[in-house]
């Protein structure tokens, strides 16, 4: 399977080939069909990448020296209407 970058390069080549003035209608149509298939596969790859990014963005950060645990819910000054929660 080609990488996204390889597919993008191939799609750019197909696009430039279609724009040539000396290309036959049959060859242009063949390149167009191949480009549509390629673009569809690339769109699926982007959707998968976006899904992975969403998962990574929603993962909690591990507790560390730079990221201490948030204890706001347990602080002494958390009172509602004069009563402790």
Image (spheres, helix red, strand yellow):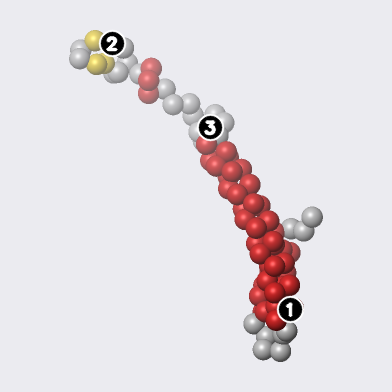
Q: Is 28 drawn above or below residue 55 in the view shown?
A: below
Q: Residue furthest front?
A: 26
State the residue at coordinates (77%, 58%): 2
The image shows residue 58 at horizontal and vertical percentages of 52, 36
Q: Which residue is mark 3?
A: 60
Report if the CB atoms under discs 1 and 3 are less than 8 Å apart: no
Q: Which residue is mark 2?
A: 84
The image shows residue 22 at horizontal and vertical percentages of 71, 89
Q: Which residue is mark 1?
A: 26
Rounded to the nearest angstrom, the CA distance separating label 1 from label 3 is 54 Å
Rounded to the nearest angstrom, the CA distance separating label 2 from label 3 is 28 Å
Q: Residue furthest bottom?
A: 22
Going by the image, does 51 lie left or right of 31?
Answer: left
Q: Secondary structure at mark 1?
A: helix
Q: Secondary structure at mark 3?
A: loop
Q: Quadrant of the C terminus?
A: top left
| Count of number-bearing discs | 3
- The mark nearer the N terminus, 2 or 3, is 3
What crowding class fits label 3: few (fewer than 14 Cα within 10 Å), some (14-19), or many (20 or more)? few
State the residue at coordinates (54%, 29%): 63
**Is residue 23 among the parts visible in the rendering?**
yes
The image shows residue 4 at horizontal and vertical percentages of 70, 59
State the residue at coordinates (63%, 47%): 48
């Amino acid at each position: 399977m080609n990488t996204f970058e390889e597919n993008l390069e191939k799609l750019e080549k197909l696009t430039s080939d279609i724009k040539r003035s000396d290309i036959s209608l049959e060859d242009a149509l063949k390149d167009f069909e191949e480009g549509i298939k390629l673009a569809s596969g690339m769109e699926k790859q982007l959707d998968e990448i976006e899904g992975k990014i969403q998962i990574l963005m929603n993962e909690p950060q591990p507790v560390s020296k730079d990221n201490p645990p948030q204890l706001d819910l347990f602080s002494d000054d958390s009172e509602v209407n004069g009563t402790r929660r």
